Amino acid sequence: MFRSLALPALLTLLLAGCQAPSTKMHQIPPNTAPVAVCGSGDVMMQTTLWFGMNKPKGGIVSSSEWQQFVDNDVTPRFKDGLSVYDAKGQWLGDNGKLARENSKALMLIHTPDVASSDSINKLRDVYKQRFEQESVMRVDSLVCVAF
């Protein structure tokens, strides 16, 4: 009788250790970083910044204001090159209403280092201050690049 109860009890205890952890899947440990494996080319960082073109007090960031920002603030920090795309953005505002606005996407390919990251954050700060923006969205991903 003891043997017939011992085996199921032992299996229950062993299988209890196979439970999924209670932590949520979207929580990534703070010291974990993604790693790119390249079949060709070099591992680099692709950063895309999204700049809203509406000014909060009315009006828009003009074409000449945008070009001055690129020429005077972006290009000196990223002389190797960049790409700019026209975009249309939308999001749900704090007031529960859908907001839409023209925007610019700035894509940078750079070394994944602190100096580049700091330069990008400085660009975001400059744009937010100059054009009174609440935010400039930043999206980073490791990519494989070959020239």
Image (cartoon, rainbow, N blue to C red):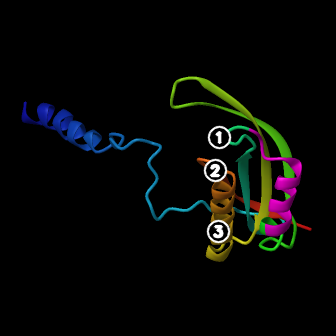
Q: Position of residue 34 (x, y in %)?
A: 60, 59
Magenta segment: 59-72
Q: CA distance from mark 3 to mark 2?
A: 22 Å
Check disc 3 and report the residue beneath it: 117
Instruction: Residue type at mark 2: give it.
Output: Glu
Q: Earlier in the sequence, mark 3 or mark 2?
A: 3
Q: Residue at x 71, y 63 (%)?
A: 37
Q: Is there a contact, CB below 8 Å, between mark 1 and mark 2?
A: yes
Q: Is residue 37 found inside the magenta-colored segment of the image?
A: no
Q: CA distance from mark 3 to mark 1?
A: 27 Å
Q: Is residue 85 left or right of residue 77?
A: right
Vertical order, 60 against 142 (above or below): above
Numbered badge on residue 56: 1
Vertical order, 2 against 81 (above or below): above
Q: Is there a contact, CB below 8 Å, between mark 3 and mark 2?
A: no
User: Which residue is at the far top?
Assistant: 97
Q: Nearer the viewer, residue 135 or 26?
A: 135
Q: Residue at x 88, y 53 (%)?
A: 64
Q: Main secondary structure of the magenta part?
A: helix
Dividing the picture into quarters, in which one does residue 127 lie?
A: bottom right
Q: Is residue 63 found inside the magenta-colored segment of the image?
A: yes
Q: Is residue 126 left or right of residue 74?
A: left
Numbered badge on residue 132: 2
Dividing the picture into quarters, in which one does residue 98 lie?
A: top right
Q: Earlier in the sequence, mark 1 or mark 2?
A: 1
User: Which residue is at the far bottom?
Assistant: 115
Instruction: Residue type at mark 1: give it.
Output: Pro
Q: Earlier in the sequence, mark 3 or mark 1?
A: 1
Q: Residue at x 14, y 31 (%)?
A: 4
State which mark lies toward you, 3 or 2: 2
Q: Nearer the viewer, residue 45 or 21?
A: 45
User: Which residue is at the far left?
Assistant: 2
